[in-house]
C-alpha cells in the first residue's frame, strides 16, 4: 500500500479546515469490547489514561500467568469478566478457540443496537497476528506426539486457520457480505481499518464490523519471553475490540432518522514501511512521522489544534523510543494531558492494540472527558511497518 509523502504542508496553518476534498469520513456507530479492564466501552473510560488522559496505568488489572510451569515468568493481563457461554450461549462453543470466542462476542456486542442489520452488504474485517496460537500449538504438537502424525483430531484443524474467527463469526451472525482477515502484527488493527475504509468508500459494503483480536496463551507468552521483546516489567495482554463502520458525509447528512450521533468519525488511516536494518531506527521514525503528517493533512486536522495522541509501542523494548521520536518530530513535546497510554493496564495486546486504543478514545469522549477535537493513533512494528489513524470527536461531545 502506498501513502502520500508529505513534509510540512502549508494547509496545516489553518485550524479545523476539514478533510481534503474527496475524503469520505467513516461513521463509527457501534462498539464491542472485551479487555483486561472489563467488558464494554465504559470499562475503558475508567482506566487511567482513558476518561482521564495522562500517565500509563498501573499493573493491577487482569490476571497473572499460571504458576504450573507452562507459562513463562511474565505478568499477563487476561480479559476480565468474559464468560463466553453467557454472551454466546452454550451451543457450538466446544470447537471454538479463545480467539474465536473473543472475536465472536465482540462482534455480537458491537452489532447489537447499532444501526443496520445482517445481510449481504454487512461484513467483517478482522486484524490478527497469526490467529489462535494455542490452537496452532496444540494441533501441531499432536502431529509429533500421536502414534502417527495423521492421527490428529480433524475437528481441531479449522481453529488453526488465521481466518477462523472472522469466518465463524460471520456464519453465527448471518453476515454474508465482505469477510476479510488481515495479518499485520502490531499494525493489524490499523491495516484492518484501512482495508475497511477502502471497501466502504469504493462501495463494496454498506456496513462493516472492524477490529482486532489477540489471545493470551502459554505458547505465545513463551515466544515473547524468549525473544525478549517486552520491556522490563511490561505485561502481556489479550482482548478484542470491534467497531461498526459505515460511510458518511462531511456534514453527517446521510444519517437515517433515529441513528443518532456516531461515537466518532474515522477520517484517515495511513500505513508505510521502512527497512529497520538498511535504514535503521531513525529511518523507521521518519517514515512514521511522514504517515502522521499525511493522515493529518487528509483529515484537515492541524498540529496547532493539539489533537490527543495515542501511541501503541509503550510495552515493546526499543520501539517505544522510535515512536516517541516520531511524535515529537511532528507535535513537539507531548505533555501528559495530550497523551493516552493504556498498555500498563491492558498489557501488550499486539494485533488488538490499535482497535483497543481507538475504543479507549471513544470511551473517553463518551464520558465527556477532555476538550480535544481529534485523536491521532500511531503504531510501529518490529519489521519496520508503521501507521497512523485520525479520528474526530462527535459534535455532541
Image: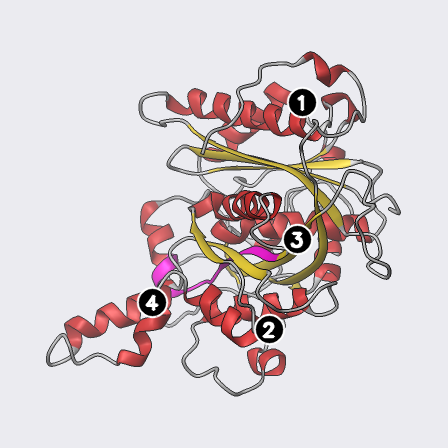
Q: Nearer the viewer, mark 4 or mark 1?
A: 4
Q: From the viewer's perspective, is residue 159 above or below residue 338?
A: below
Residue 110 seen from this side: yes
**Which residue bears the numbered disc 2?**
82
Q: CA distance from mark 3 to mark 1?
A: 28 Å
Q: Secondary structure at mark 1?
A: helix
Q: Quadrant of residue 290?
A: top right
In terms of sequence position, does the residue under pointer 1 or pointer 2 come before the other?
A: 2
Left or right: where does residue 243 sit relative to residue 132?
A: right
Q: Secondary structure at mark 3?
A: strand
Residue 370, percent from left and from top: 83, 41
* Numbered tag placed on residue 331 in the rendering: 1
Q: CA distance from mark 2 to mark 4?
A: 22 Å
Q: Secondary structure at mark 4?
A: helix
Q: Nearer the viewer, mark 2 or mark 4?
A: 4
Classify the position of the N terminus by image quarter: top left
Q: Nearer the viewer, residue 227 or 248?
A: 248
Residue stretch in magenta: 208-221
In terms of sequence position, does the residue under pointer 3 or pointer 4 come before the other?
A: 4
**Which residue bears the numbered disc 4?**
160
Residue 48 seen from this side: no
Left or right: where does residue 157 sit relative to residue 256?
A: left
Left or right: where does residue 348 sit relative to residue 217?
A: right
Left or right: where does residue 311 sit relative to residue 321?
A: right
**Which residue bears the numbered disc 3?**
245
Amino acid at each position: 500500500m502506498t501513502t502520500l509523502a508529505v513534509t510540512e504542508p502549508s494547509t496545516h496553518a489553518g485550524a479545523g479546515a476539514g478533510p481534503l476534498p474527496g475524503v469520505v469520513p467513516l461513521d463509527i456507530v457501534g462498539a464491542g469490547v472485551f479487555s483486561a479492564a472489563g467488558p464494554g466501552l465504559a470499562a475503558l473510560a475508567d482506566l487511567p489514561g482513558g476518561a482521564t488522559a495522562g500517565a500509563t496505568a498501573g499493573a493491577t488489572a487482569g490476571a497473572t500467568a499460571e504458576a504450573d510451569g507452562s507459562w513463562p515468568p511474565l505478568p499477563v493481563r487476561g480479559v476480565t469478566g468474559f464468560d463466553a457461554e453467557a454472551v454466546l450461549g452454550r451451543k457450538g462453543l466446544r470447537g471454538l478457540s479463545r480467539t474465536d470466542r473473543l472475536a465472536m462476542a465482540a462482534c455480537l456486542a458491537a452489532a447489537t443496537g447499532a444501526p443496520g442489520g445482517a445481510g449481504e452488504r454487512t461484513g467483517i474485517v478482522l486484524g490478527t497476528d497469526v490467529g489462535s496460537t494455542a490452537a496452532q500449538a496444540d494441533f501441531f504438537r499432536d502431529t509429533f506426539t500421536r502414534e502417527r502424525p495423521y492421527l490428529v483430531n480433524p475437528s481441531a484443524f479449522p481453529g488453526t486457520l488465521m481466518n477462523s474467527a472472522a469466518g465463524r463469526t460471520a456464519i453465527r451472525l448471518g453476515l454474508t457480505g465482505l469477510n476479510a482477515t488481515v495479518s499485520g502484527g502490531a499494525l493489524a488493527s490499523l491495516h484492518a481499518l484501512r482495508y475497511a475504509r477502502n471497501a466502504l468508500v469504493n462501495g463494496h459494503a454498506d456496513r462493516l464490523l472492524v477490529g482486532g483480536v489477540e489471545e493470551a496463551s502459554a505458547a505465545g507468552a513463551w515466544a515473547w519471553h524468549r525473544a525478549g521483546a517486552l520491556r522490563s516489567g511490561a505485561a502481556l495482554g489479550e482482548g478484542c475490540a470491534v467497531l461498526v463502520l459505515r460511510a458518511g458525509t462531511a456534514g453527517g447528512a446521510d444519517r437515517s432518522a433515529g441513528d443518532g450521533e456516531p461515537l466518532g468519525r474515522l477520517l484517515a488511516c495511513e500505513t508505510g514501511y521502512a527497512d529497520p536494518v538498511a535504514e535503521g531506527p531513525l529511518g523507521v521514525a521518519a517514515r512514521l512521522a511522514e504517515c502522521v503528517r499525511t493522515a493529518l493533512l487528509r483529515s484537515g486536522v492541524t498540529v496547532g489544534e493539539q489533537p490527543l495522541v495515542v501511541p501503541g509501542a509503550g510495552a515493546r523494548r526499543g520501539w517505544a523510543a522510535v515512536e516517541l521520536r516520531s511524535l515529537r518530530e511532528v507535535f513537539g513535546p507531548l505533555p501528559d494531558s495530550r497523551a493516552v497510554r493504556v498498555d500498563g493496564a491492558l498489557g501488550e495486546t499486539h494485533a488488538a492494540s490499535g482497535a483497543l486504543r481507538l475504543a479507549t478514545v471513544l470511551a473517553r469522549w463518551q464520558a465527556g472527558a477532555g476538550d480535544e477535537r481529534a485523536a491521532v493513533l500511531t503504531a510501529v512494528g518490529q519489521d519496520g511497518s508503521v501507521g497512523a489513524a485520525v479520528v474526530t470527536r462527535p459534535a455532541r461531545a
